[in-house]
Amino acid sequence: MDAPDYYSLFNPQIIDSAEYHPNYFIDIAREFSPNTDDDQTPNLKEWGEYFGHSVQSNDIRKLVYGYNQNILTFLTNAVKNRKITTPDSLLGNTAIDQVFVTNNVEVFEYLAFAYQAADYAVAGVWDGEAESKKTITELIRIGTNLYKKCANNFLKIRYGYQLTRLAHISKDYEQATSFFDTYVASSKTESIIRYWALNYKAGACKWLGESAESIYNYANVFAHCKSRRAHAMQDFSQLGYVTRPTTWDSAIKLCKNADEKVNLWAMRGFTGFYVAENYSYVFSPSDWGLNTYYDSAFECLQNIAKINPASKYLEPLLGQAIQMIEYNKLNTKRLTRNGGYNSMDFYENRSSLPYAEPSALRDIVNKIKANPKTKRPYFWNYASAYLSYLMKDFKEARNELKVAESKHTTDKFLAKEIASLEAIMKLDEATSVTPELETYLLNTLTQFDIKPFSRKEEWTYNFFDRDYNPSHTWKYIMDKMSDLYDKDGNFEMSEICEPTLQLYSMMDYDTTDMLLKFISKEDKTPFQKYAATFYPAKISALYNLEGTILMGRNDFYGASVRFKKSDDSLTEKDYLTADPFFIRMRDCHDCDYDSTSKMKHLTKLEFCEKMLELEGKKDQLKPDASAEVYYQLANAYYNLTGYGNCWRALSFAEHCSLSLRQDCSKAEEYYKKAMKLTRSKEFAAKCCFMAAKCEQNTFYNLFAEFNSWDTELRQEGTKEKYRYQTNFATLTTRYSDTKFYQQAIKECGYLRRYAKK
């Protein structure tokens, strides 16, 4: 998942409702998403109660969910005809054993039928699939007969569910509601299956135009069946019921008691966030009635408080509402030190969202906390303080924090959150970094269980986890301190507090060295020492980066010195991807990777040492030997560019995207020296061709815009191109009689076109 583009500083851990514990606004759908285990767990619990304690839970799971129709049909027949031998693979299952001992063949009959029905629940029936519908009709006939024959209420309600589902899948919605009313609603058996079936009846009512009853049924599913909550919310949202006051009022009238009314308002409130999560990134808030859904969240909070000020829904709904405001007020879209926007700049124009200001929500919160029946009033005091903070009303925020602190006694999270909010306000009021501010914030930061960065291969630190954790507050404090340090001219601490790792993309040696010296020094303040432990690039990695930068500048001695200081395992793993001294007539990176895949590759340090060795002896040998050394060096310089097979050598770790070095001038220079020194005409032709490749690359580096659809630009580019074909001229005039030239002109279209002009 991508990092969210806003900070969430309101900790849901202080909310007193574990079942409805709010997740991030951007991830609310996941909190209510259907989950197979959530479906299976309550169902298996009921099956366990049905079989009794003597049957092992794993055996029940295997029987209910692990066997296919053929096995279940075989077991049915085996109970009816004891002469049939049961395979060894089925022996020892305590659930199966009990069915055989009690002669309870109805269990196997039901499970075999359920397995058949499940196939169509997954596949569904599409228009024109008459054969499938015919099969479902036959299944419904069989299921109805099995229901009538069955004497076990535990199984009968399950038959009712299967029949309701099959009828819904076949789009016979009247039959679906009839099956539910006849076979499920009439049952006195308490079972989660009732709400599974009710979800299908709610859908049937929706398609039959019975909107109010559909809403009412969905609300009951939402309240009583966690695994089907997402289905209820999604179906409820799709028809835009909230935009129809008369329909909503009719649904309210169907409620039998205050609890059912609260459930209805709660589903409406949570669905508002669900819809926003699924559609607001694609459509504007006015599309799909999103404005209405946003309005609904606040309206639902008010109505639930009127009906039951101690409702379990109030606190999580408030948490979601606050996160919606945080999305607008605490976004992470911030100017970075290079003048651009950071990577979390996803969305624009947030202020267009309704209720962008927290004042409306604070008014609602203040009314709720004033009610003597409100549960945990200190929580609402804290919520009011937090909303005041979002309004930049720090005085009122501090007053509410004092009240909250005086009221709470045993809440293990609230004291920490009060201290955190005090620290955040102090930080927001600061205009520069002082020793007092560092000390104060260090005490706040150390209370969070944030672990220092330790994985050497990674270069990004995900402070924003999918689930809320205090790292949002931690990260907010560090980012704000980064801004203050930057304002004070302290680049090193600004970078350490908010790692941008721009030094990797810029390949700037001076900046890297400055940061390295700062991290290495001992006389840092306690806050600076603490912050430095979280900087992703450790000292060893920075030495590696410096070495890489110097290697890119052809300073192989300086690079080797830095690589030797980089004593962690990263340097040893940092191998070149191919043989840097090997070259092809036609560049083929993958070919080079494959051909050297089983060879021992050089590390950057080994490569630099080899280059120093070759550079040291290139002019100390006889001409032909010296030419060969120059040729090897030229190959290496070429392969370090973006055209060569070792271009990744100038990238620092896999997670950094660096500008490729495109300059082939050094390689061209050495190819020409090799060509001049050698006494072999064939080898000279080869060196000349490679120099021509370098020259050709230089042309494309300088005049890439000439490769255009614009006719005039192409013509101008063609004229310029001839200025960068001097080595082709040498090759055709001096070496056209060599075997290498004949091979080259076959493989190189550029050379063929030049030779024909």
Image (spheres, rainbow, N blue to C red):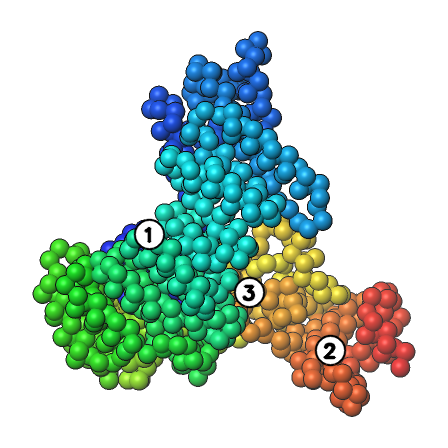
Q: Position of residue 599 (x, y in %)?
A: 61, 50
At label 1, the amino acid type is Lys
User: Which residue matches tag 2?
Assistant: 696
Q: Position of residue 204 (x, y in %)?
A: 53, 50
Disc 3 to disc 2: CB gap under 8 Å: no
Q: Quadrant of residue 374?
A: bottom left
Element carrying mark 3: helix
Judge by depth and name the residue closer to the eye, 590 or 693.
Answer: 590
Judge by depth and name the residue closer to the eye, 250 or 388.
Answer: 250
Is residue 635 visible from the viewing direction of this image? yes
At label 3, the amino acid type is Ala
Residue at 41 percent across and 63 percent down: it is: 248
Residue at 35 percent across and 61 percent down: it is: 265
- Name, please, the residue furthest toward the left: 406
Count neighbours of disc 3 (C-alpha within 10 A) and say few if under 14, some if 14 to 19, many if 20 or more. many
- Mark 3–mark 2 Cα distance, whole angstroms, equals 23 Å
Residue at 44 percent across and 48 percent down: it is: 228
Element carrying mark 2: helix
- Above or below, 320 against 354 in this view is above
Q: Decide which of tag 1 and tag 3 comes sooner along the chain.
A: 1
Residue at 76 percent across and 73 percent down: it is: 688
| Quarter of the C terminus within the rendering | bottom right
Nearer to us of marks 1 and 3 is: 1
At label 2, the amino acid type is Gln
Q: Position of residue 435 (x, y in %)?
A: 18, 77
- Mark 1–mark 2 Cα distance, whole angstroms, equals 83 Å
User: Which residue matches tag 3?
Assistant: 649
- Above or below, 118 against 12 in this view is above
